[in-house]
Image (tube, rainbow, N blue to C red):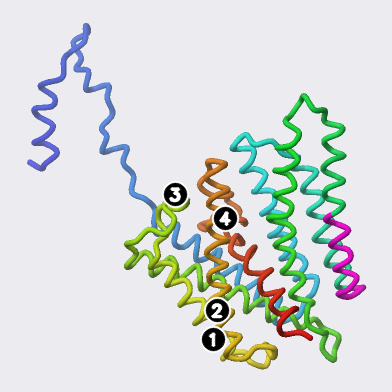
Amino acid sequence: MGDGGRFAGPIRQNFPKNASGLAIRERIPDCRALVQPIPMTSVFFSRLASTLALWIIVLGTILSGNEPGFFLIVSTMGMVGLWEFYRMLDHGKLPNFKITAMICGGVLFAGSFLAFHYLGKPQSVDFEAIALVGFLITVFSRQMFKGLHEVEPLPTMAYTLFGLFYVAWLFNFMNKIIYITPRGADLAATGQYYVLYLMVVTKFSDMGAYVVGSLCGKHLFVPHISPKKTWEGVGGALLFSTLGSFGMLALIPQRLPLFNWGHAALLGVVLGFAAIIGDLAESIIKRGANVKDSGSFLPGIGGALDLIDSLLFTAPILYFYLRCVLIP
């Protein structure tokens, strides 16, 4: 007889019987029947399929130089991430004007792209400044028509504006990097390869943190925010991001003419650390809203905000490095 039979005998004998003479144990389901194996294979293939699909779309758009494609990718991920942010606030019962914010976010992404595409870089910077002022006026106006006693006015406006700045404004730097360098002889945008560089370095940082932290992580980094992050993982993130930076410069040096090996080394470390902060920043928000994932937009990965959280911090850093250090 197997182990189950040996344990079943004495347990059955010890259970009392009810008035009808039936053993009470018969009403209790077998716990072993409730334990289902975790479908790790299914999760792995879902994550793999989502990752491959995303990279195929991104690489196809970058290699083709399709500017409307850039806009669709950036705006879609940004808008979905923005919606997920406000849904997290709703889950945590934190007041916000998410419909107003979504309209403002859509105006920022669409208007910024059109300004870059048709007017040029100086006018696009002016548009963004106008948009940010418009965010403040719009949110205050929305609160005026809501009434001060229906919701808490200051938290509502603060949460709404924070989402616009944290997701929409920061992610819009992806658009700005695409157009930061002069157009080519065929008038095509040339900055998309710096976006590709940014994505590779950022994701290498995420991968290094996960791989090294999983294999040899022992010393916790910020356990009050993320109990799984370790100092060893931080080191792995910086190592992998630097390797990714060197690898991109070695693979496509003609597409990254502003970089040399010194820039690649410095950016590898700086962007790698910024990616760590970006990941932890979303962890703080998720803890505040009491959610595990921002959403389920990408099978096997989670929400769009889970995917772009590191880019929200690395994109502005690369943009300002290009604009203030490398481009006269």
Ranked by sequence position, the earlier of labels 3 and 4 is 3
Q: Give the residue at mark 4.
A: 281
Q: Give the residue at mark 3.
A: 224
Read off the magenta span.
Answer: 118-132
Q: Give the residue at mark 2.
A: 268
Ranked by sequence position, the earlier of labels 1 and 4 is 1
Estimate the spatial distance between the alpha carbons at disc 3 and disc 2, rounded to whole Å: 27 Å
In terms of depth relative to the viewer, which is nearer, 176 or 52? Answer: 176
Estimate the spatial distance between the alpha carbons at disc 1 and disc 3, rounded to whole Å: 34 Å
Asked if the residue under mark 4 is in contact with the one under mark 3, i.e. CB atoms within 8 Å, the reply is no
Residue 244 relative to residue 199: left or right: left
In the image, what residue occupies the spot 45% across and 53% down?
Answer: 226
- Determine which of the numbered discs, if any, sits on residue 246 in the image: 1
Residue 131, percent across and down? Answer: 85, 57
Ranked by sequence position, the earlier of labels 2 and 4 is 2
- Determine which of the numbered discs, if any, sits on residue 155 in the image: none
Residue 237, percent across and down? Answer: 47, 71
